[in-house]
Image (cartoon, rainbow, N blue to C red):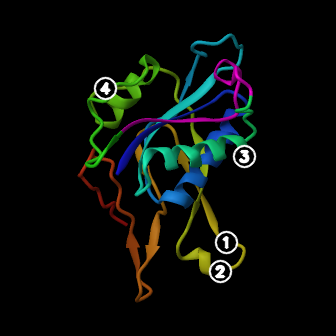
Amino acid sequence: MFYLCSIGSNLDPNTHVSTVLGELLARFGPLQLSSVIRTEPVGMQSCNHFLNCLLIVESGLDPASLKQIFVALEIAHGRDRSDPLCKVHDRPLDIDILASSPEGDFASARVDPYLTELLAELYRHSEVHDPKVELLVQLPNESSKRRAGKAVQPQPVGLRPLTLGPRVQQSKGGQSTPAIHLDAGPRHITVPHQ
């Protein structure tokens, strides 16, 4: 099953969004990611701007089990979900499931107005006009996992939609194979030339 999800943060957002993207990648594999934008708080009083993005995750989990993982990540990042007003307080991390689909096509999904341009951008229907923010996400590198001390590599994200995943995968014969990116929309792949 494919899930359209949103990530938001307005307390140390660069750190929390970068870190959780790496954690989600390690847990679920490649993620189709929108740009990362800076937005005003919606539905709450705060002087802290949010970083927001959309992502598409593929998982065999049902929605309730996936949400439990997201809540555990929010708590691990410092969100106090026991507070009955946590929806209207500043937060280090908020991850929501917006829609699910067996095919992964969310082009016509309904999202909050501040996320509409991000969704359209994922499907190449529109440009994003909110300020974009570049983040560095630590990615596992298949070939470097075998060498102590070099288990991650940073990848810039946030300025355009992309598929977040290891850049180079090691084949059984020791040959490097190019990463496959789902940047052309659902069910399309791009294999970058090396």
Number of the label disc, if any, that sits on residue 126: 4
Could you say whether the residue bearing mark 3 is in a helix, strand or loop?
helix
Q: Is residue 26 left or right of residue 173?
A: right
Helix, strand or loop under label 1 = loop
Label 4 amino acid?
A: Ser
Task: Report the amino acid beneath label 3.
Answer: Ala
Which region is colored magenta?
83-99
Kind of residue at badge 1: Lys
Q: CA distance from mark 3 to mark 1?
A: 25 Å
Amino acid type for the residue under numbered disc 2: Arg
Q: In the rendered structure, which disc, 4 or 1, sits on the residue that comes first in sequence?
A: 4
N-terminal label among 3 and 1:
3
Q: Position of residue 62 (x, y in %)?
A: 43, 50
Q: CA distance from mark 2 to mark 4?
A: 42 Å
User: Marks 3 and 1: which is nearer the front?
Assistant: 3
Report, in whole angstroms, how far the alpha carbon at label 2 lies from the one at label 3.
28 Å
Q: Which of the two residues, 108 or 34, is positioned nearer the viewer here?
A: 108
Q: Going 62% across and 40% down the picture, which residue do you hit?
A: 17
Q: Which of labels 4 and 3 is toward the front?
A: 3
Label of residue 76 in the image: 3
The quadrant in which residue 3 appears is top left
Q: In the rendered view, would you say 17 is above or below 10?
A: below
Q: Are marks 2 and 3 in contact (CB under 8 Å)?
A: no
The C terminus lies in quadrant: bottom left
